[in-house]
Image (spheres, rainbow, N blue to C red):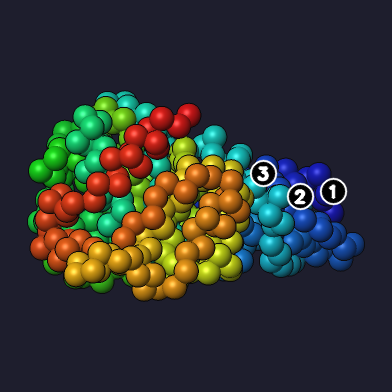
Amino acid sequence: MPTEQEIRDALTKVMDPELGKNIVELGMVRDIRITPDGEVGFALALTIPNCPLKNKMKADAEQALLALPGVKYVDVTFAQLSPAELQAAMEKGRGNLPQLNLLNKIDRVLCVLSGKGGVGKSSVTALLAVALAKQGKQVGILDADITGPSIPKLFGLPTGGLRGGEGGMLPAITCNGIKVVSINLLLKEEDAPVIWRGPMISGVIQQFWRDALWGSLDVLLVDMPPGTSDAAISVMQSLPVNGVVLVTSPQELAGMVVRKALNMTKTMNVPVAGVIENMAYFTCPDCGKQHDIFGPSHAGEIAKTAGAPLLARLPLRPQLAMLGDAGQIEEADAPEFEQIARQLMAME
Ligand SMILES: Nc1ncnc2c1ncn2[C@@H]1O[C@H](COP(=O)(O)OP(=O)(O)O)[C@@H](O)[C@H]1O
Ligand SMILES: [Mg+2]
């Protein structure tokens, strides 16, 4: 029968395809069992409980162990990495991120994240990009919301607008010179459904990062998939993120949803650059009074919990939804973003 060390050695052939390192190095192998009658087993501790790759890794492990002399049966069970172990695994995986296309130079990557959908993440991404571009920055948007891409629509970019050049794919370009890469630019019809699981999403994101000709960018904004989904975790794993911009709305209590998002950034070891509260109030056009339509703000508490500045509280602007629907988000009047853009660019 093989020794425990021989089993470990054999298991170094089994890769976590998402992190690009082997499961032994990632600390995912636990409780190795060896019985004299030829059965060996271990627990495979997963990064995500329902990791869609778990059966692939299990099959690879079985194959690797059955190849050892004396092994007749293999029993692989599943376990889960603790938050600290997960963080260590992520850091190992991070050193293995896809290389940026040599023609690209991207100074900083900011992810726009929210606890849940519909709080205005894509709108904030777009408006922030416009403000940055107007300040003379070279800006790109990577639309990582693969299953609900909305960036091209906001900017009125036609489907099929992503073209290939010799060195890679060419981003679509908005009126203000913002470079956009989105799955929607590849689809024939704008509303074709995209039902993809984590690993495929992570593959596409890595391609958008590596194979798109971004050129020289001061900042790449990433419009994230909603909340703390597997897709969101995959995106964070796939890119060298410098900071997260957390978008909230007053409907989100300072509770669970946001805490989950914050835990995710902590686990991934990515700092929160700032918090933006969207749809915070409505200014009545007749009397000029501010109304807290969605209830009192929790943005202050959330920012405090995140240990990050509250960058802005943005009002409800019906005009914003209209311009977004018409593909004219670049025309929107959202003066707060001038300051938000400056503050984000001034951070380390
Ligand atoms: N400050 C705002 N005022 C009015 N409508 C807004 C505002 N922010 C976002 N919206 C609208 O709310 C909807 C959801 O916004 P969106 O940016 O798509 O959210 P998410 O990307 O988080 O799902 C869109 O119709 C958008 O036009
Ligand atoms: Mg969106």
| On screen, residue 133 above or below 288 | above
Is 316 situated left or right of 155 in this image? right
Residue 331 showing in the rendered view: yes
Pointer 1 residue: 3
Mark 1 or mark 3: name the one nearer the start of the chain: 1
Dot in front, 1 or 3: 3
Is 138 situated left or right of 262 in this image? left
User: Is mark 1 in CB contact (under 8 Å) with mark 3?
Assistant: no
Helix, strand or loop at label 2? It is helix
Pointer 2 residue: 7
* Viewer-side residue, 93 vs 75: 93
User: Is mark 1 in CB contact (under 8 Å) with mark 2?
Assistant: yes
The residue lying at 71 percent from left, 50 percent from top is: 84
Is 93 situated left or right of 332 in this image? right
Total numbered labels: 3
Helix, strand or loop at label 3? It is helix
| On screen, residue 218 above or below 238 | above
Give the amino acid type for the residue marked by disc 1 in the picture: Thr
Give the label on residue 283, or none.
Answer: none
Measure the C-alpha gap from mark 1 to mark 2: 6 Å
Give the label on residue 88, or none.
Answer: 3
| On screen, residue 140 above or below 162 | above
Quarter-wise, where is residue 154 in the image? Answer: bottom left
Dot in front, 2 or 3: 3
The residue lying at 29 percent from left, 45 percent from top is: 337
